[in-house]
Amino acid sequence: MKVRSITLHRVGMPLVRPFETSFGRESARDVLLVHLETDTGDGWGECVAGSTPGYSSEYVDGCAHVIEHHLAPRLFAADDVVASELGHLFSGVVGHRMAKAALEAAVLDAELRASGVSFARYLGAVRSEVDCGVSVGISTSIDELLDEVQGYVDAGYLRIKLKIKPGWDLEPVRRVRELIGADAALQVDANTAYVRGDIPHLKQLDASNLLLIEQPFDEEDIASHIALAGAIETPVCLDESLVSVGVTIDAIERGATSVVNIKPGRVGGYLPAVAIHDACVERGVPVWCGGMLETGIGRSMNVALAALPGFTLPGDTSASDRYYREDLTEPFVLSNGRLAVPTGPGSGVTVRTDLVRELALMPPRVVTR
Ligand code: NPQ
Ligand code: MG
């Protein structure tokens, strides 16, 4: 395959309600889309970076710059672009995994559409639908939180994840547990908001019988996660820290993480994500698919990934209407707490280019050789 042009779109997606985490509050998703034109057809990819470097060091403007100036030239220079060889093609660029992942998704989409193969089949999916959870932001009051959670329970979500931070943890978690009952699946995500001295405090979460606690400490602080895992009954699950298959294996072997959150954007793409899945399966570590407020483009590919055999826990693969009134593709709709895995070629969804144009935050940027 030869890449002819790469068009970068910036879209402002209004959220149905503001989403607050320990690192900030967003009322719209500023999303970067990659549209690839090749000699065998088109492909689309979505970049998971946020508008500011709050979740990771990457952010939208930085990703757009790296794609245009450092990754695109490598694609244009290649005689034959193949998704499985992008790791090598991009190896001269250190890090910038979210930028690499967005291009990888677009290359995969183009390649698979041209060969008539779905993401699910290509990645090794074994299910036709996936169990879905939902991530619930930090609220302004416990009553508001309980209302929101009840809405998701009514919608059929099979697992609830609460965002926590110092000052918003034990009490909201206890009240949600009370609301949804002892047997409902409940977990928490701190997005690095705590420090090692908080371990005695976090240990009190054991009383709420959680599935897991996600990334309480700094992304580079594996040691504190090991200390927490030794002190708490609740399983520890890393997110931000796990940027590669090597780091993931190391964190597992050192006892820092007994469950793994896999986000393709965070690890450089769907192929590195599958490698992490395989390493976890080999070690008996359960995995689940994270979410980054994707539009239907990224969501379709995440749902395909979540259909692999090692994804034994519900993911943050929520329905389109959890975040958006109008999605950039046909909407993903929950049925009995599950989403159907797309079966068409490539991502299997159709991008609503009219909506991409309508919601554009700036003119598209066309990059050619
Ligand atoms: C997580 N996602 O698991 C992330 C955090 C997150 C669904 O909880 C813009 C860019 C907004 C990145 C919101 C969920 C974001 C973002 C949340 C990441 O940690
Ligand atoms: Mg997380």
Image (spheres, rainbow, N blue to C red):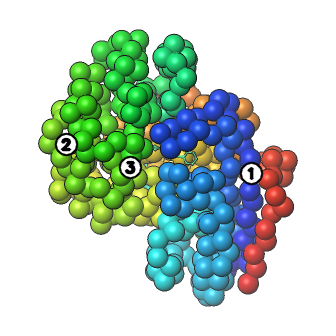
Q: Is residue 8 above or below residue 348?
A: below
Binning the other alpha carbons within 10 Å of mark 3 as few (below 14), some (14 to 19) or many (20 upward) gives many
Location of the N terminus (image quadrant): bottom right
Q: Which residue is mark 2?
A: 229
Amino acid type at circle 3 is: Asp
Q: Which residue is rendered at x = 47% and y = 71% of the image? A: 95
Q: Secondary structure at mark 3?
A: loop
Give the mark toward the camera: 1 or 2. 2
In the rendered structure, which amino acid carries the disc numbered 2?
Answer: Ala
The disc at residue 198 is none
User: Which residue is nearer to you in this view: 84 or 319?
Assistant: 319
Which comes sooner in the sequence, label 1 or label 2? 1
Q: Is mark 3 within 8 Å of ligand 2?
A: yes
Q: Respond yes or no on whether mark 2 lies under 8 Å from ligand 2.
A: no
Q: Residues within 10 Å of mark 1 (few under 14, many from 20)?
A: many
Query: Label 1 sits on what residue type?
Result: Val
Per the image, label 1 sits on a secondary structure element best described as: strand
Q: Is residue 315 above or below residue 150?
A: below
Q: Which residue is mark 1?
A: 11
Q: Residue 73: in sight, yes or no?
A: yes
